[in-house]
Image (spheres, rainbow, N blue to C red):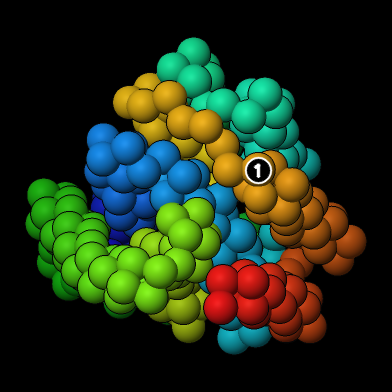
Amino acid sequence: MLVDNASALASQLGISTFLVGIIVVGFGTSAPELFVSAMAAIQDKGNLALGNALGSNITNIGLVLGSAAMLRALPVANNTARIELPLVIGTGLLAIVLVLDGVLSHVDGFILLAVLICYLIWSARNSEGAGGEPPLEKLAAHPHDLDLSHLDHPRGASTKTAALFTVIGIVLLLVASRMLVIGSVKIAAYLGVGELIIGLTIVAIGTSLPELAAAVAAARKGVHDMIIGNIIGSNVFNTLGVLGLTGAIKVTDIDTAALARDFPIMFGFTILMFVFALTKGAFSRFEGTLLMIGYFGYLSYLISIAI
């Protein structure tokens, strides 16, 4: 419902599917990460919020992008490979630099949030400018862009109706993910697992389920622009928005394991995504399989040290 109505809304408003993927689907499906991390920070569980942000970024690339690419090869637009993906790398580097002192401070949080606002403004202007992605009704002239024939747009739906069902889809994803996370966190706490590991595994997977659901649905419909836009938007939002809000709410002493292990792994997955996008101009099924293997290897390692 979210994918179909977000695409219909973009078509009616004449904006690009890539921008919809970043703002509507990417940030909309990242709402669980934001909500959980804000609650964790308020409850003085900053490393749970940190693990959620880092783990969700790793999950988005390894599990979400990997599974979508395994279903169908995902072409990557030149603009995405040259501009958008380097921005994801840049935001990751910024976060690493800010927390090298072992603390996610209020200043760090406000810096990340300020960069997020700048990114949103840049994305909107870039989409509207000459170099932006074409409106949906013009995509038929661009064979490497979205194929609208695969979409199941609600027949006769007005802009308001499409917007309403887009919001409903986001809310339902938020509620379902929150329910899953509540139960999972209680089980993990009962087993005596540390909050960083909980955030990196159960919470990260639970809050990334909306991205996974949206990516699988979009892959089946051939909406590759929205899949990649979703992942880019979600990872930028997790790095700048989730970490930024966490720091703004509560000063957090970073778990040393996160600095030594999880930040480098997140950055490594981001670099790998960038390399795959550049080499062949697409994420192949083989590359999707490699991402999945890498992700489950990382997950298995986290589980092994937690037991």
225 or 86, which lies in front?
86
Q: Is residue 190 left or right of residue 306?
A: left
Tell me: residue 3, above or below residue 27: below
Residue ID at (80%, 59%): 272
In this view, the residue farthest toward the top is: 107
* Horizontal and vertical percent position of residue 173: 24, 65
Residue ID at (68%, 74%): 301
19 or 234, which lies in front?
234
* Horizontal and vertical percent position of residue 128: 48, 30
Q: For residue 268, what is the image quadrant?
A: bottom right
181 or 128, which lies in front?
181
Tally the numbered discs. 1
Location of the N terminus by quadrant is bottom left
* Horizontal and vertical percent position of residue 197: 51, 61
Q: Is residue 38 left or right of residue 198?
A: left
Q: State whether residue 155 appears in this view.
A: yes
* Horizontal and vertical percent position of residue 44: 32, 37
Location of the C terminus by quadrant is bottom right
Residue ID at (46%, 78%): 216
